[in-house]
Amino acid sequence: MTVRLTLISPATSGSPRDVGFDDDSPLDPDGIARAESVASAVDPSSRAYTSPSVRCRRTAEALGLSAEAVTALAGCAMGRWRGQTLAAVAAAEEAALGVWLSDPAAAPHGGESSRELRLRVGAWLDGLGAGSGRVTVVAEPDVIRAALVHALGAPDEAAGRLDVRPLTAVHLSGRAERWNLRVGDPLVPVRALGGASPGQAEGRLHSRSSR
């Protein structure tokens, strides 16, 4: 049995913000509008899930998905660093930040380590692989990175080298312990692809990325 899983990163607010560690702020109207503008590129799934953060749930709604919020897909718990900028943490706890950046098992902030996040997300992913069919998930970037590291059996350190941009889709297909990866499809409105259906649009995007 094969699962076709699409992982979509959420929209971000229009005004630039120097927040290194998410504080679960809501999307502003510009972020919602950007998500709504690419809703036609998202193929509705019988199963849709979302990280429980406000921006992921709101992005899922704007994309036209009736998605269930899943606790296992929450972003990494950052403890006392939550909502702080990277610069502020570096100034106050330079040594602790260095440990966190270099050791996936470390959680000097009092929350979760990167490894704990990967194990949590990986357990959810493995359970998903017991079924079949199309699944769509709107998830925080660190959750998507954790899912990819787990699916590929890569070392935990690899997560820090994966760049997940807003409103992009990553595709996994397969089952537990045997996933195939297709990366980096931008969410493009159907009208930009000549009126194709979401499924056809996905095929065209795949064809372009294979050239």
Image: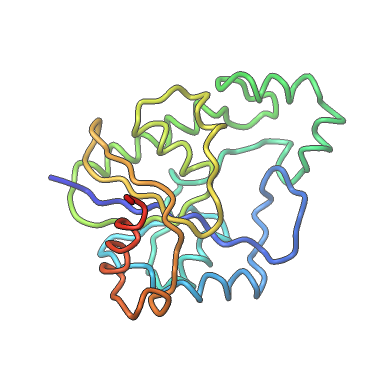
Give the farthest residue toward the left. 1
Return the residue nearer the eye: 73 or 158. Answer: 158
Residue 152, position in %: x, y?
35, 31
* Picture residue at 54% right of the left edge, 29% below the top: 114
The residue at the far front in this view is: 211
Is 88 placed above or below 17 here?
above
Residue 75, how many percent across, how many down?
54, 44
Give the camera-side residue of 208 and 189: 208
Give the answer, above or below, for where 6 lies relative to 143.
below
Number of numbered labels in the structure image: 0
Q: Nearer the viewer, residue 41 or 137?
A: 41
Q: Residue at x 78, y 43 (%)?
A: 85
Left or right, 73 with respect to 174, comes to right
| Res 104 → quadrant | top right
User: Residue 97, position in %: x, y?
Assistant: 73, 25
Is residue 103 toward the left or the right of residue 57 in the image?
right
Q: Split into 4 quadrants, where in the image is the N terminus?
A: top left
Q: Quadrant of residue 129?
A: top left
Residue 69 vs residue 83: left or right? left
